[in-house]
Image: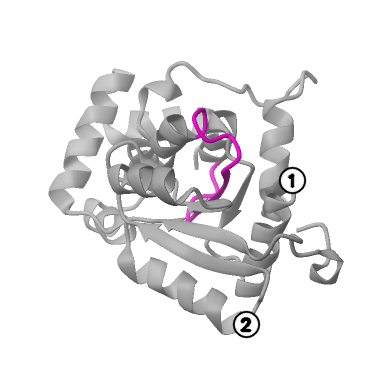
Amino acid sequence: MTTPADDQQAPTSGPVRVFLVDDHALFRAGVKAELAGLGDARISVVGEAGSVGEAVVRINTDQPDVVLLDVHMPDGGGRAVLDQIHPALPNVVFLALSVSDAAEDVIHVIRAGARGYVTKTISGPELADAIVRVAGGDAVFSPRLAGFVLDAFSDRPGAAPATDPELDLLSPREREVLRLLARGYAYKEIASQLFISIKTVETHVSSVLRKTQMSNRYELSRWATDRRLI
């Protein structure tokens, strides 16, 4: 966040109409309660969805001002929502709200049209501020994430590439599993972290091994390290 909350002005036409997209109902409830508890007249939560399909239908119908978008969900995640909504409704602004702070996740959704990216460690007042700012046309990032975007879209030597063809073969969820695997997490721990079953973790790992043409988790760890995923 680069601008104090006191410097932000609410839109003159009324509160910013916010729509939440996250596959965890408890998290959606927490965000709504947090925003409501602020008593911030600049913001009004007008809807929510727990899946890509539901989000696409509801956003098309409700046409909110700002969508708070989870990056990692089944059926293509936040990128799938962006791909289906952003071209048709360019006035709807997307602010990614994710547990991930990985460079490739940030770049992935920004390239698809998101206006900002903040992590789920953000405080309620900071989130409210970020919503108002993106609605007003600003690009908003959690502090350490802005550098990823600057690197990806700059031409300076040593900048991180905006795309990686091999990495692009992996889905957002596969990249998240790979990141935790490379950090030394056991399958059971990965399942707990991502709220999925151990069997699903095994399926994702098998898919990553096949797509990267690696044979074991140690090779995958080196591959992930080379791409700064850890």
Give neighbour class at mark 1: few <14, some 14-19, many 20+ (Cα, 10 Å). Answer: few
Seen in the picture, residue 73 relative to 216 is either above or below; the reply is below
Element type at mark 1: loop
Give the x, y percent position of residue 52. Answer: 32, 43
Does the rendering let one see residue 26? yes
Q: Is residue 185 left or right of residue 137?
A: left
The answer to whether 184 appears left or right of 136 in the picture is: left
For residue 204, which quarter of the picture?
A: top left
Exactly how many numbered labels are in the figure?
A: 2
* Residue drawn at (75%, 58%) of the image: 1
Q: Name the mark on residue 137.
A: 1
Q: Is residue 119 above or below residue 179?
A: below
* Residue at the image point whose x is 56% and y is 57% from the top: 119
Q: Amino acid at mark 1?
A: Gly
Instruction: Determine the secondary structure under disc 2.
Output: loop
Farthest left residue in view: 199
Segment tinted magenta in the rendering: 86-103
Q: Residue furthest right?
A: 7
Sequence-wise, the earlier of marks 2 and 1 is 2
Q: Residue 193 falls in which quadrant of the image?
A: bottom left
Q: Nearer the viewer, residue 19 or 105?
A: 19
* Location of mark 2 (residue): 39
Say if mark 2 contacts mark 1, CB within 8 Å: no
In the rendered structure, does residue 93 fall within the stretch colored magenta?
A: yes
- Which one is in front, 156 or 78? 78
